[in-house]
């Protein structure tokens, strides 16, 4: 991210750039991308963004990979200070529906993969494993929607249509521009 941040600063001298973080320590911040409760992390980042005077009148946001869902959740749930323009690259807005494959001869990996997939909607996984909070199994949509999944919430995927959060829709439509982009060359 530092390289991207430097490129933006070189292209637009004098621009203010802030990279959100969960932990000021680089190793701790990287770990927070795998372990933690995304809802709690979002509260921390909302407070972080609100405390930066340069952002008080709004800002443009760019999210990469799961950072795209994270920033979309910020826009939907809070958006103060407001995001004006929003770009995501390679973000899994519809989640992930499978875990990485293992070599057919790696028995330990196969066992770990099956165990993880079987427990992805448990309360513990949904509160502690970031990727579990983005997991969306099309074969288990009711379980996904009822699990309290971070992704189901920000996608407004609920069992009862009357439970949809209109504020999420209003906050997203308040953006001047939104550019979700896949990482492939399409």
Image (tube, rainbow, N blue to C red):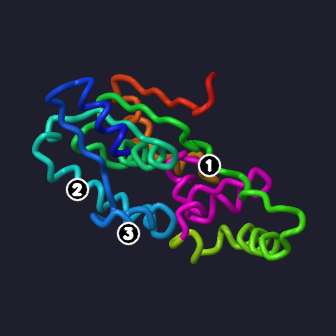
The x and y percentages for residue 131 are 58, 60
Q: Is 127 in the magenta?
A: no
The kind of secondary structure element at disc 2 is: helix
Q: Earlier in the sequence, mark 1 or mark 2?
A: 2
The x and y percentages for residue 115 are 76, 75
Instruction: Judge from the rendering whether residue 57 lies leftward or rightward of residue 149; answer left or right.
Output: left
The foreground one among 68 and 108 is 108
Q: Main secondary structure of the magenta part?
A: helix
Q: Quadrant of the N terminus?
A: top left
Residue at point 25%, 28% (across, down): 10
Query: What residue is shown with label 1?
Result: 95
Instruction: Judge from the rendering whether residue 166 lies leftward or rightward of residue 124; answer left or right.
Output: left
Residue at point 46%, 27% (across, down): 179
Query: What residue is shown with label 3?
Result: 28
Query: What residue is shown with label 2?
Result: 48
The foreground one among 60 and 162 is 60
Q: Earlier in the sequence, mark 2 or mark 3?
A: 3
Labels 3 and 1 touching (C-beta < 8 A): no
**Tag nearer the camera, 3 or 1:** 3
- Separation of disc 2 and disc 3 at Cα? 17 Å
The foreground one among 86 and 29 is 29
Q: Magenta part of the protein: which range?
A: 129-157
The x and y percentages for residue 156 are 54, 46
- Separation of disc 1 and disc 2 at Cα? 26 Å
Residue at point 46%, 35% (across, down): 88
- Separation of disc 3 and disc 1 at Cα? 24 Å
The foreground one among 157 and 127 is 127
Which image quarter: residue 172?
A: top left
The x and y percentages for residue 31 are 45, 67
């Amino acid at each position: 991210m530092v390289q991207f941040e430097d490129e933006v600063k070189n292209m637009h001298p004098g621009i203010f750039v802030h990279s959100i973080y969960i932990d000021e320590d680089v190793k701790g911040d990287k770990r927070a991308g795998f372990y933690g409760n995304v809802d709690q992390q979002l509260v921390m980042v909302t407070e972080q963004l609100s405390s930066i005077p340069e952002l008080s009148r709004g800002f443009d946001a760019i999210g990469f990979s799961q950072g795209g869902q994270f920033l979309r959740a910020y826009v939907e749930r809070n958006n103060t200070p407001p995001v004006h323009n929003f770009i995501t690259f390679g973000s899994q807005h519809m989640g992930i529906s499978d875990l990485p494959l293992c070599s057919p001869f790696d028995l330990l990996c196969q066992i770990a993969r099956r165990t993880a997939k079987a427990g992805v909607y448990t309360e513990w996984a949904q509160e502690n494993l970031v990727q579990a909070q983005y997991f969306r199994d099309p074969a288990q949509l009711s379980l996904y929607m009822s699990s309290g999944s971070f992704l189901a919430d920000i996608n407004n995927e609920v069992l009862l249509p009357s439970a949809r959060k209109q504020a999420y829709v209003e906050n997203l439509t308040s953006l001047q521009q939104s550019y979700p982009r896949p990482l492939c060359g399409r």
